Image: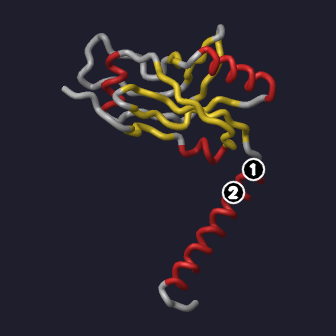
Amino acid sequence: MPREQGRKVVASNRKARHDYAILDTYEAGMALTGTEVKSLRAGRASLVDAFAQERNGELYLHGMHIPEYTQGTWTNHEPRRTRKLLLKRLEIDRLIGKTRESGLTMVPLQVYFSDGWAKVEIGLAKGKKSYDKRQDLAKRDADREIARVSGRRGKGMSE
């Protein structure tokens, strides 16, 4: 059976981009059990309230929910267990340094399969204040209105 190609997104954390300003992103592998991979392949996962944290020089993903595999037996996994992130030592040291020095947070943005391997996209993020969120919403609405008006002009319609 040939290995799958490309990128298949399983779950994304849309609220993270609303609550945080994403400064940098990293792709990490995850240490998973067999039933976790099967659940992910079925498209079942949630990144709500998930975060990455350093412990003993390693990075771990906390709070990610992968439901139990329905055809699993006694070998099934715990849905919210802590999962180890697989990164190169240089990347781990860089992430740990940035989170310690400037109070940044590591937030998972997406879980996906890249060429058959389960990956998670980790964002180095800084929390937004409520007025920043309002400014972003106002800017998005203004851009949408501009696009709508310019689209009508392009079609020859008037206001």
Q: Is residue 31 above or below residue 18?
A: above
Q: Is residue 131 left or right of residue 8?
A: right
- For the residues labelled 2 and 1, the Cα–Cα distance comes to 10 Å
Q: Quadrant of residue 101?
A: top right
Return the residue nearer the eye: 140 or 5: 5
Q: Say which label, 2 or 1, has the lower sequence index.
A: 1
Q: In the rendered image, which quarter contains the C terminus?
A: bottom right
In the drawing, what numbered circle is on residue 136? 2
Quarter location, residue 107:
top right
Residue 69 % position (x, y): 31, 24
The tally of labels here is 2
**Residue drawn at the location 60% of the way across and 24% of the way down:** 52
Left or right: 70 with respect to 10?
Answer: left
Residue tagged 1:
130
Kindly check if marks 2 and 1 are in contact, taking CB atoms under 8 A apart as contact.
no
- Residue 154 percent location from the top left of the image: 51, 83
Q: On screen, 73 above or below 8? A: above
Please state if 62 lies on the left or on the right of 80 as rendered: right
Numbered disc 2: secondary structure: helix
Q: Amino acid at mark 1?
A: Ser
Give the position of the N terminus as an image quadrant: top left
| Within-10-Å neighbours for mark 1: few <14, some 14–19, many 20+ | few
Residue at (52%, 18%) from the top-left corner?
Answer: 86
